[in-house]
Image (tube, grey):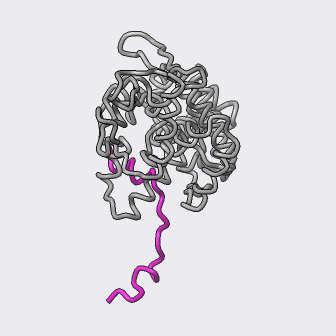
C-alpha cells in the first residue's frame, strides 16, 4: 500500500503534517512519530520536510535556509522560531486542498476601517497593519525598521530605501520601497503623535524631530518591540513575540478570516505578478532567492487547454 493511502485528505492532512513537525522539533524520532500516526517513516519525513519548506519560504525562520529544512537536527536547533511561526501559519502547499487567501483591495480598505475603529492606538496600528501590504516584509523585519529607513534627514519619505542586512531575516540587504501615499497618510500622524508625546526624540529639524536610529514602530511601552536572542555563537537567533501578538490582534480587529502575515506575502506577490513583475523581481522584493520558491509562494490557477487556445490568433 502506498504511503499516502492511509493519510487523511485536505485540511486534516495539513494539520496532521504540522503536528508531525512539532513532534520532531520537540525531539521525537521519525520512527516514533510514524508509529503514532500509523504511517511509514518515509511518509513522515517527506511530509515534515514539505511543511518546513513551506513555512520557511512563506513566513521565514531566521538562520534556517531551504536546504536546512531537510535535516531534523537543524530543525530542532530552531525549535522556538518554528513553533512561534507555526502559530501564525496556514498551510497552502503541498496539499492543494486550501486555496491561497488573497486579500482584495476592497477587503483591505474595510479591514483598515475596522482596525481604525477598534484600536486604542489607531494611527500606530493602522500603519503597522498596512506596512505588511506595502512591503511584504516579515513581522520581525518590520519590528526592526528604524526611523532612518523611512525618513530622510530633511523629513521627506525615503521612497527608495533598503532593508538593511541586520534587519533582514536572511541577513541580506534588499530594496525596500515606501511608494504608497496611503501608508504616508497613516505613518505621518503616528510619527507626529510620537513627537508630541516625546518618545525617542532626536535633533530638532531632522527626521521630523525623532531619533533616526529609534525603531519606526514602538510598542505600547514607548520603546521598540522586544526582540529576544537565543542560542549561542553561529546559532544565535532572534524572536519577537510582541510583534507577532500585535499582528494577531490586528487580524482579529480586521475580521479577515484565514488571513495571516503569510497570506499577506501571497497577496503582495499576487499584486506584483498582476503588474507584470517577473519571478526575479518578486524574489528580490520579498527576500526569496530561488525562483522555484517564488513560484510556490504564488499559486496561480492553471488555465485549461481550451482557455489557452481560445482566440489565440
Task: Please name whichever residue, 25 or 258, is drawn nearer the observer in this view of the structure.
Answer: 258
Q: Which stretch did the figure color magenta?
A: 289-313
> Where does residue 248 sit, x and y in percent of width and height?
64, 37
Q: Position of residue 69 (x, y in %)?
A: 44, 32
Please tell me which residue is depicted at 53% across the width and 44% down the height of the picture.
262
Q: Residue at x 59, y 20 (%)?
A: 221
Position above or below: 111 against 223: below
Q: How many marks?
A: 0
Q: Is residue 1 visible?
A: no
Front in this rendered view, residue 199 or 252: 199
Residue 297 is a magenta residue: yes
Q: Is residue 124 left or right of residue 202?
A: right
Q: Position of residue 22 (x, y in %)?
A: 61, 29
Q: Residue at x 62, y 30 (%)?
A: 245
Q: Which of the 4 image quarters holds residue 167?
A: top left
Above or below residue 313? Residue 158 is above
Residue 173, placed above or below residue 114: above
Residue 55 appears in the figure:
yes
User: Quarter of the image containing the C terminus?
Assistant: bottom left
For residue 70, which quarter of the picture? top left
Residue at horizontal 35 percent and vertical 51 percent from the top: 282
Q: Where is residue 246? Give x, y as percent.
A: 61, 33
The part of the image, by quadrant, that contains residue 253 is top right
Above or below for 253 versus 216 = below
Amino acid at each position: 500500500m502506498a504511503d499516502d493511502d492511509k493519510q487523511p485528505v485536505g485540511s486534516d492532512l495539513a494539520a496532521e503534517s504540522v503536528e508531525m513537525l512539532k513532534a520532531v522539533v520537540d525531539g521525537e524520532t521519525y520512527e516514533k512519530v510514524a508509529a503514532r500516526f500509523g504511517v511509514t517513516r518515509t511518509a513522515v519525513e517527506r511530509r515534515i520536510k514539505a511543511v518546513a519548506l513551506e513555512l520557511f519560504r512563506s513566513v521565514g525562520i531566521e538562520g534556517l535556509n531551504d536546504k536546512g529544512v531537510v535535516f531534523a537536527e537543524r530543525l530542532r536547533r530552531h525549535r522556538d522560531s518554528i513553533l512561534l511561526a507555526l502559530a501564525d501559519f496556514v498551510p497552502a502547499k503541498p496539499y492543494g486542498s486550501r486555496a491561497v487567501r488573497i486579500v482584495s483591495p476592497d477587503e483591505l480598505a474595510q479591514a483598515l476601517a475596522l482596525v481604525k475603529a477598534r484600536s486604542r492606538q489607531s494611527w500606530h496600528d493602522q500603519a503597522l497593519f498596512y506596512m505588511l501590504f506595502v512591503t511584504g516584509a516579515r513581522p520581525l523585519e518590520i519590528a526592526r525598521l528604524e526611523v532612518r529607513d523611512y525618513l530622510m534627514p530633511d523629513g521627506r519619505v525615503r521612497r527608495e530605501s533598503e532593508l538593511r542586512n541586520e534587519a533582514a531575516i536572511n541577513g541580506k540587504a534588499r530594496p525596500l520601497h515606501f511608494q504608497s501615499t496611503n501608508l504616508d497618510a497613516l505613518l505621518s500622524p503616528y510619527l507626529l503623535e510620537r513627537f508630541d508625546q516625546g518618545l525617542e526624540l532626536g535633533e530638532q529639524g531632522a527626521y521630523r524631530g525623532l531619533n533616526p536610529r529609534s525603531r519606526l514602530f514602538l510598542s505600547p511601552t514607548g520603546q521598540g518591540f522586544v526582540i529576544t536572542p537565543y542560542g549561542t555563537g553561529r546559532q544565535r537567533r532572534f524572536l519577537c513575540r510582541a510583534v507577532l501578538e500585535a499582528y494577531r490582534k490586528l487580524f482579529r480587529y480586521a475580521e479577515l478570516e484565514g488571513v495571516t502575515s503569510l497570506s499577506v506575502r501571497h497577496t503582495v506577490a499576487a499584486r506584483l505578478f498582476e503588474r507584470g513583475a517577473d519571478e526575479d523581481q518578486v524574489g528580490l522584493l520579498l527576500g526569496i532567492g530561488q525562483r522555484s520558491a517564488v513560484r510556490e509562494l504564488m499559486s496561480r490557477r492553471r488555465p485549461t487547454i481550451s482557455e489557452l487556445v481560445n482566440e489565440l490568433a
